């Protein structure tokens, strides 16, 4: 791919489509939406409205970190607190696709409202080729695939631009680097649209997400020096008897997953050094309330997928 030609072509396309109107981009902290925003900002400058929807399903400190990173690039990000709406929509749901649907519906309801309020006529999405392929293959519905899931943005009088939809992750990272996004941002691990909800088996409640968020931070901190595609924690629905303090505890179970991949279509399991795994276990059982067991997932993709729902 000729990265510079790609950038010039898409800047021109966004300029032509948006003109002097406004466009909205929703950032997630991931490289796809960050690259889309940086590209659009080059094209239309302050006509781009960048928002971060706080759905309560993000990693620790994600919103303020995104806003800070983008401020350094001259892009102002508005953080919108929609946590209650997302948790209300997810309440009582246990089926993976039901949870994805509830997330998606809430996401587009909130986003639609914000777009309307902003007066924008265009929505920029960071959809990439892998999202489209996985949805077409029916593996799972990725939340940002509007057309394929029967959502019609024209209902909202909106045009949708997906400038990265022909690229795979490594190419997106190349574009991000060429747009001068900081390395921490373009080498950031992929994080799914529905956030920590893809890693909570069973009902997604604020308390369960908080347990997972703490465990996720520990896994990210302890694996920061390893070369891998994604490293994260998962909260299982089962419980296991363990010993906490002076007595028996029927506690929660965290699975740890570390995978290597280039494009997320296949993935292998990383042979994380034993010392690292032991430290992860020690920290999670000591620092995360109610967890009595930590497992390491040794399943590649296929037959597994990377995420758990
Ligand atoms: P799976 O679990 O299908 O994940 O092997 C492949 C890659 O996609 C990410 N992923 C998502 N990204 N919205 C996204 O933007 C989603 O709904 C979604 N589900 C999975 C996952 O983290 C992995 O990198």
Image: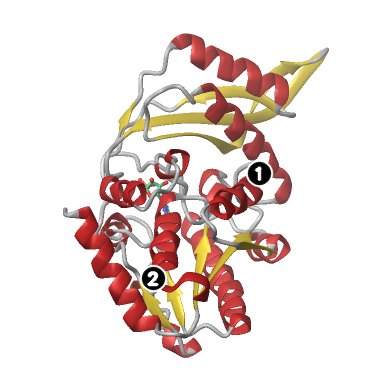
> Could you give the CA–CA distance between mark 2 and mark 1, rounded to whole angstroms?
29 Å
At label 1, counting other C-alpha atoms closer than 10 Å, the crowd grade (few under 14, some 14-19, many 20 or more) is: few
Image coordinates of residue 29 in percent, x first then y, are 52, 51
- Observer-nearest of 164 and 11: 11
Q: Pinpoint residue 20: horizontal percent, then vertical percent.
A: 45, 85
Camera-side residue of 260 and 44: 44
What residue sits 46% from the left and 60% below the top?
Answer: 97
Mark 2 or 1, nearer chain start: 2
Label 2, on which residue?
43
Badge 2: few (under 14), some or many (20 or more) residues near its Cα, within 10 Å?
A: many
Which residue is outermost to the top?
275
In the depicted structure, whether residue 99 falls above or below residue 17: above
Whether the residues at callouts 2 and 1 have beta carbons within 8 Å, the answer is: no
Provide residue 309's location: percent of width, then percent of height: 46, 49
Asked whether residue 144 is in view, the answer is: no
**Residue 82 in sight here:** yes
Q: Is mark 1 within 8 Å of ligand 1?
A: no
Note whether ligand 1 is within 8 Å of mark 2: no
Q: Nearer the viewer, residue 61 or 309?
A: 61
Residue under label 1? 61
**Label number found at residue 20:** none
Please provide percent x and percent y for residue 191.
47, 47
């Amino acid at each position: 791919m000729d990265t510079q030609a790609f950038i010039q072509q898409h800047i021109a396309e966004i300029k032509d489509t948006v003109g002097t109107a406004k466009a909205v981009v929703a950032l997630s902290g991931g490289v796809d939406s960050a690259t889309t925003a940086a590209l659009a900002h080059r094209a239309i400058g302050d006509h781009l409205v960048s928002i971060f929807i706080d759905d309560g399903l993000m990693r620790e400190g994600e919103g303020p970190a995104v806003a800070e990173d983008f401020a350094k690039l001259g892009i102002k990000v508005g953080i919108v607190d929609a946590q209650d709406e997302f948790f209300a929509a997810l309440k009582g749901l246990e089926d993976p696709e039901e949870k994805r649907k509830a997330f998606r519906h809430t996401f587009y309801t909130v986003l639609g409202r914000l777009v309307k309020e902003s007066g924008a006529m265009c929505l920029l999405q960071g959809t990439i080729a892998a999202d489209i392929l996985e949805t077409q293959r029916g593996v799972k519905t990725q939340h940002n695939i509007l057309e394929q899931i029967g959502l019609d943005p024209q209902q909202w009088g909106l045009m949708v631009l997906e400038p990265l939809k022909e690229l795979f992750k490594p190419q997106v990272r190349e574009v991000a680097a060429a747009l001068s996004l900081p390395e921490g941002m373009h080498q950031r691990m992929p994080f799914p649209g529905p956030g920590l909800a893809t890693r909570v088996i069973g009902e997604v409640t604020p308390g369960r997400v908080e347990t997972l968020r703490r465990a996720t931070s520990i896994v990210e901190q302890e694996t920061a020096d390893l070369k891998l595609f994604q490293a994260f924690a998962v909260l299982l629905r089962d419980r296991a008897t363990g010993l906490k303090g002076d007595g028996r505890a029927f506690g929660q179970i965290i699975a740890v997953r570390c995978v290597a991949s280039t494009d997320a279509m296949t993935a292998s399991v990383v042979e994380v050094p034993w010392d690292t795994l032991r430290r992860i276990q020690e920290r999670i059982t000591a620092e995360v309330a109610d967890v009595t067991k930590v497992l390491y997932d040794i399943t590649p993709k296929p037959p597994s997928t990377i995420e758990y729902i």
